[in-house]
Image (cartoon, grey):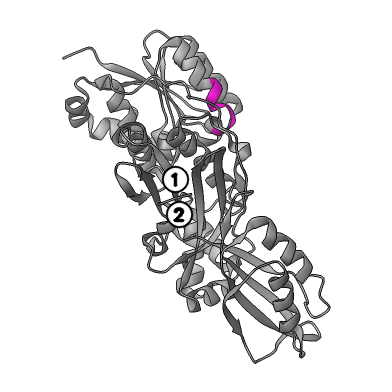
């Protein structure tokens, strides 16, 4: 058998400890699958964790201890961008391969790191950076390589999906659902990255770059979170035949890439509408294969470690690729070309004529109405009674609905902010621009 693949591991957090466990417990099967032994020789972490058995590997609190000739591949699991970037750049400069689970690092400086890896002729594996339990990076790089990929869409943040599921299935409000997610370890103490869509946007930027053979452009992703979705929106959506999901969507257009993360009404008949809890799912459409669905656990120690170790097995085989150069940096289009139906929740004062004014504004902006829900009972908001007018529009351009909603908000008969959520027909979207 060939000489072992010698691994230097940075980070002994939840994922790092799980990687150690897999390398130790599955040592023999990993060697068979990789064609040679995969040996953990060095570990660097801020502190030693006696409950994590690192076997015969040496331990150090200094990350520079991995910059040594007896390490073939550095596994970066410390997170963040500063120290992680320095560690990865040092490894590449030293001719060592890199495996990382760090989506923030790749979203921030992935293009530069890929370029450095190409120049040094080393591999950079990042399967674990997106939807840990789903081998979606491998699918895009290899399994779907024969296809011109046109679109991808999915649920790529388990925290947000868990919260929306709890709101839909248990009737919890956003705050209680978030608190439960935090108690169960699905959400951080500061959940901003998850619930405001930043985490999903970083992942989508990485997937879009792979799918469309372009550079990573996280800044070009339109981002909206779920913190403004309330349980009433979810109830009305269900009444209209939809489920609200937090989607990442990327599509190839003639003049660039449309990439967006936002809540969406998804028809209940769609497979993604049925994805619940912390599960992730990604749909990909290619010209040859059609639409494929990839689903599995999106986060957690063992699912993410599974993806990390899978990259190590590929590296041991010699099949983990050196990053290819992007064909071109395609421009990001934002929402300019988005045309879709919209859900509107308008807080109307309970008086005659308000709906007529609403309908008139929509008509002037060429927005037709598909469905309306208007409850007869008044809801107390402070001292003023109001009733929600729920409108499902037909397809409308993004700029038209923005202007119309701004006008609606100025009506004397409208009290409070108007909720607006896009409707996404995934089946139709996957078949054309």
Front one among 154 and 313: 154
Q: What element carries label 1?
A: strand
Q: Residue 151 carries which label?
A: 1
Residue at the spot 51% in from the left edge and 70% down from the top edge: 167
Question: Is residue 407 a member of the stretch shown in magenta?
Answer: no
Residue drawn at x 29%, y 17% is: 5
Task: Name the N-terminal-most of marks 2 and 1.
Answer: 1
User: In the rendered structure, are the residues bearing label 2 and label 1 in contact, judged by CB atoms less than 8 Å apart?
Assistant: yes
Residue at screen point 59% across, 46% down: 198
Query: Quarter-wise, where is residue 377 in the image?
Result: bottom right
Marking on residue 409: none
Q: Which stretch did the figure color magenta?
A: 107-112
In this orientation, does residue 287 appear? yes
Mark 2–mark 1 Cα distance, whole angstroms, equals 8 Å
Residue at image mark 2: 429
> Taking 339 as reference, is 35 left or right?
left
Q: Residues within 10 Å of mark 1 (few under 14, many from 20)?
A: many
From the viewer's perspective, is residue 308 above or below residue 373?
above
Q: Is mark 2 on a helix, strand or loop?
A: helix
Depicted 396 relative to depicted 11: above or below: below
Find residue 54 and report its horizontal and vertical position in percent: 34, 28
Q: Which of 184 and 319 is in front in this view?
A: 319
The answer to whether residue 91 is seen in the rendering is no
Q: Residues within 10 Å of mark 2 (few under 14, many from 20)?
A: some
- The residue at 44%/67% (across/down) is 267
Give the x, y percent position of residue 398.
64, 57
């Amino acid at each position: 058998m060939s000489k072992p693949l010698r691994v230097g591991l940075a980070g002994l957090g939840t994922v790092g400890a799980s990687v150690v466990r897999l390398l130790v417990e599955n040592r023999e099967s990993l060697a068979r699958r990789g064609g040679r032994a995969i040996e953990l020789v060095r570990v660097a972490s801020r502190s030693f964790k006696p409950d994590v058995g690192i076997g015969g590997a040496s331990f150090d609190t200094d990350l520079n201890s991995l910059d040594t000739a007896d390490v073939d591949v550095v596994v970066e699991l410390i997170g963040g961008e500063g120290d992680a970037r320095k560690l990865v750049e040092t490894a590449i400069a030293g001719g060592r391969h890199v495996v990382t689970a760090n989506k923030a690092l790749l979203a921030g400086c992935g293009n530069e790191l890929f370029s450095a890896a190409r120049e040094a002729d080393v591999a950079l594996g990042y399967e674990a950076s997106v939807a840990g339990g789903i081998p979606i990076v491998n699918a895009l790089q290899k399994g779907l390589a024969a296809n011109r990929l046109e679109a991808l869409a999915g649920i790529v943040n388990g925290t947000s999906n868990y919260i929306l599921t709890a709101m839909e299935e248990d009737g919890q409000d956003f705050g209680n659902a978030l608190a439960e997610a935090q108690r169960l370890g699905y959400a951080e103490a500061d959940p901003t990255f998850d619930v405001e869509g930043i985490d999903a946007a970083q992942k989508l930027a990485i997937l879009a770059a792979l799918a469309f053979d372009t550079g990573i452009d996280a800044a070009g992703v339109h981002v909206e979170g779920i913190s403004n979705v309330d349980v009433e929106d979810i109830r009305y959506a269900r009444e209209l035949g939809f489920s609200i999901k937090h989607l990442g969507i990327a599509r190839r257009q003639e003049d660039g890439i449309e990439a967006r993360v936002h809540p969406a009404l998804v028809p209940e008949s769609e497979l993604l509408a049925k994805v619940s809890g912390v599960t992730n799912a990604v749909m990909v459409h290619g010209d040859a294969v059609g639409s494929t669905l990839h689903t599995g656990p999106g986060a957690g120690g063992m699912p993410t470690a599974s993806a990390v170790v899978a990259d190590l097995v590929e590296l041991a085989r010699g099949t983990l690729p050196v990053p290819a150069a992007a064909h071109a940096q395609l421009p990001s289009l934002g929402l300019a070309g988005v045309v879709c139906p919209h859900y509107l929740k308008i807080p109307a004062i309970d008086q005659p004529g308000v709906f007529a004014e609403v309908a008139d504004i929509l008509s002037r902006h060429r927005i037709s109405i598909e469905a309306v829900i208007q409850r007869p009972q008044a809801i107390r908001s402070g001292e003023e009674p109001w009733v929600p007018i729920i409108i499902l529009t037909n397809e409308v351009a993004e700029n038209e609905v923005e202007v119309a909603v701004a006008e609606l908000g100025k009506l004397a008969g409208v009290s409070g902010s108007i909720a607006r959520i896009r409707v996404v027909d995934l089946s139709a979207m996957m078949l054309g621009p």
